[in-house]
Image: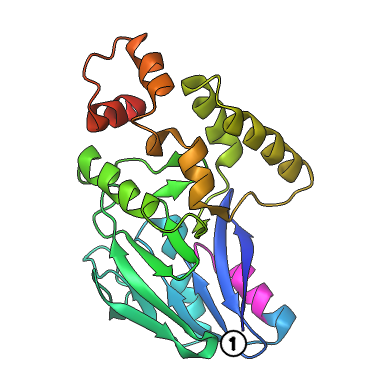
Amino acid sequence: MFEITAIPALQDNYIWAIHNERSVVVVDPGEAAPVLDFLAARGLPLDAILCTHRHHDHVDGIEELRGVYNVPVHGRSHPKNPHITHGLREGDRLGLDQFGLVFDIMELPGHLEDHIAFVAPGMVFSGDILFGAGCGRNFEGTLAQLHHSLQRLAALPDETLVYCAHEYTAYCLPFALNCEPDNPDIRRRIEETMALRAANRPTVPFTIALEKATNPYLRCTNPELILTLQARGLTDTSELAVFSALKG
């Protein structure tokens, strides 16, 4: 058995801790201090670090953590990410025996070329590809790659819980509503998000089903969304053209 706990970090990051009464594995430690505090409060050791991609707010705590706990760092190897000790690629599997977990590795380019996701039954650690009602920026690669990566996540079972790396839901939802003003699921999610944030509670994780109902980047074939974009000058209504217009 295990729990998954959000450790707030930096301005709006979440470092995810997978833990039980014996050990802890963290995902994307952008800074070390909150992780060290988490470990000290529970009197637990750090067993491993998982890394979705090389951006500083996901890796800047790794060196300090490894100075205290000489643990493996699992992620996609890249010349600009010196922290990875155990490289992972598409189709690899990573077992965390202490939790009875096995992750399938999914390569998801479009934000950065080295971006991966860790997928296990009922959960995915999606880094900066998929956010609550939003998605990551296209820093490397193409919009077609980013769109394809999002479609791969959308194909996961509806009940899959998405553990993304940022608390962006409240920021993204107004744009979603602007795209689909008559979508009742978006309006409901806005109310729920406001209540959660007012109580200082995270909006993450969320389900794939909720994203497919409210995230415009997963709804590029929706008629209302297409009509909204056509009113702003869109002429090509192919799925990738709609996605590109949303990202424009």
Name the residue type under label 1: Ser
Query: Is residue 86 toward the left or the right of residue 131 in the image?
Result: left
Q: Quadrant of the C terminus?
A: top left
Q: Is residue 27 magenta?
A: no
Q: Bounds of the magenta span?
A: 29-39
| Quarter of the image where the N terminus is located | bottom right
- Magenta stretch secondary structure, dominant: helix
- Between 139 and 168, the one lying in front of the other is 168
Q: Quadrant of residue 186?
A: top right
Instruction: Kindly identify the residue that appears in the image at 27 percent across and 74 percent down.
Output: 88
Identify which residue, 188 or 35, lies in the foreground: 188
Instruction: Give the camera-side residue of 81 and 226.
Output: 226
Name which residue lies at 40% across and 84% down: 95
Query: Which residue does the numbered mark 1 point to in the structure image?
Result: 23
Residue 115 visible, this angle: yes
**Residue 49, percent across and down?**
45, 76
Q: Is residue 76 above or below residue 220?
A: below
Which residue is located at x 59 percent, y 58 percent?
Answer: 9
